[in-house]
């Protein structure tokens, strides 16, 4: 069962959602995803997401989450904004609360496991998955950082300041 609000979407029973092959979808403003915004250069844009329940051939309940949008990452070289197309696709095994996650699932990189907590907050899940999908050190492809060419040619800010002070001193008296 899902409940549509502004950005509040909750799965009352994630395992039932998966078994019934239900689908929920929505859009959320990036600015509403506080933990994500913290690592971005700005919180503009929207993320669209689709959550699809599935009972696999192995009779295990899963959630297939996809999300897309454009995020403004921070370039790790020049610290400027960097548009990054988000195309997320996650496969999540739903495990009953309190049940240990089977080892083989942990070793499978193609999917993660999540606990089937009641009233699961889908937007929080979307944010979590986006955080996991972000590149660790995003950079502009053609990033150009102004670099000092040599010690002698470089003017330190203090030298410039000293020059200004000198001129100011000249106006005094
Ligand atoms: Zn850059």
Image: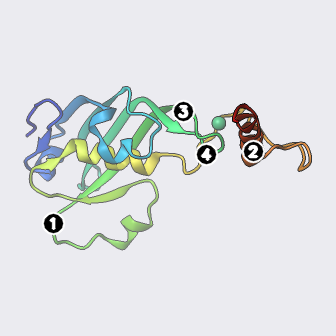
Label 3 vs label 1, nearer the camera: 3
* Residue nearest the observer in this picture, 108 or 60: 108
Assign a secondary structure to mark 4: loop
Can the viewer see residue 55 in this picture? no
Earlier in the chain: of badge 4 and badge 1, it is 4
Earlier in the chain: of badge 2 and badge 1, it is 1
- Can you tell me whether the CB of the residue at mark 1 lies under 8 Å from the nearest atom of ligand 1? no
Q: Are marks 3 and 1 in contact (CB under 8 Å)?
A: no
Name the residue tied to disc 3.
81
Q: Are marks 2 and 1 in contact (CB under 8 Å)?
A: no
Name the residue tied to disc 1.
97
Label 4 vs label 1, nearer the camera: 4
- Residue 70: % across, % down: 45, 28
Badge number at residue 162: 2
- The N terminus appears in which quarter of the rendering? top left
Earlier in the chain: of badge 3 and badge 1, it is 3
* Residue nearest the observer in this picture, 101 or 172: 172
- Can you tell me whether the CB of the residue at mark 4 lies under 8 Å from the nearest atom of ligand 1? yes
Q: Please report the residue visible at 45 percent of the width from the left and 34 percent of the height from the top.
A: 87
Q: Please report the residue visible at 23 percent of the width from the left and 55 percent of the height from the top.
A: 59
Label 2 vs label 3, nearer the camera: 2
In the displayed structure, 52 sits above or below 91; it is: above
Label 2 vs label 4, nearer the camera: 2
- CA–CA distance in space, label 2 to label 3: 33 Å
- CA–CA distance in space, label 4 to label 1: 39 Å
Q: Please report the residue visible at 15 percent of the width from the left and 50 percent of the height from the top.
A: 120
- CA–CA distance in space, label 2 to label 4: 32 Å
- Residue 157: % across, % down: 72, 44
Badge number at residue 76: 4
Earlier in the chain: of badge 2 and badge 3, it is 3
Q: Is 66 displayed left or right of 78 in the figure? A: left
Q: Are marks 2 and 3 in contact (CB under 8 Å)?
A: no
């Amino acid at each position: 069962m899902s409940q549509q609000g502004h950005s509040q979407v909750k799965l009352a029973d994630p395992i039932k959602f998966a078994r019934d092959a239900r689908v929920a979808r929505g859009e959320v403003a990036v600015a509403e995803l506080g933990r994500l915004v913290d690592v971005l250069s700005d919180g503009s844009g929207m993320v669209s997401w689709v959550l699809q329940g599935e009972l696999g051939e192995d009779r295990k309940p899963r959630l297939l989450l996809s999300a897309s949008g454009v995020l403004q990452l921070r370039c790790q070289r020049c610290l400027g904004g960097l548009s990054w197309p988000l195309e997320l696709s996650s496969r999540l095994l739903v495990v009953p609360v309190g049940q240990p996650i089977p080892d083989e699932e942990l070793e499978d990189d193609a999917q993660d496991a999540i606990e089937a907590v009641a009233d699961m907050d889908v937007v929080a899940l979307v944010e979590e998955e986006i955080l996991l999908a972000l590149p660790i050190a995003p950079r502009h492809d053609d990033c150009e950082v102004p670099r000092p060419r040599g010690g002698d040619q470089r003017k330190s800010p203090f030298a410039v300041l000293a020059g200004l002070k000198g001129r100011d001193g000249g106006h005094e008296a």
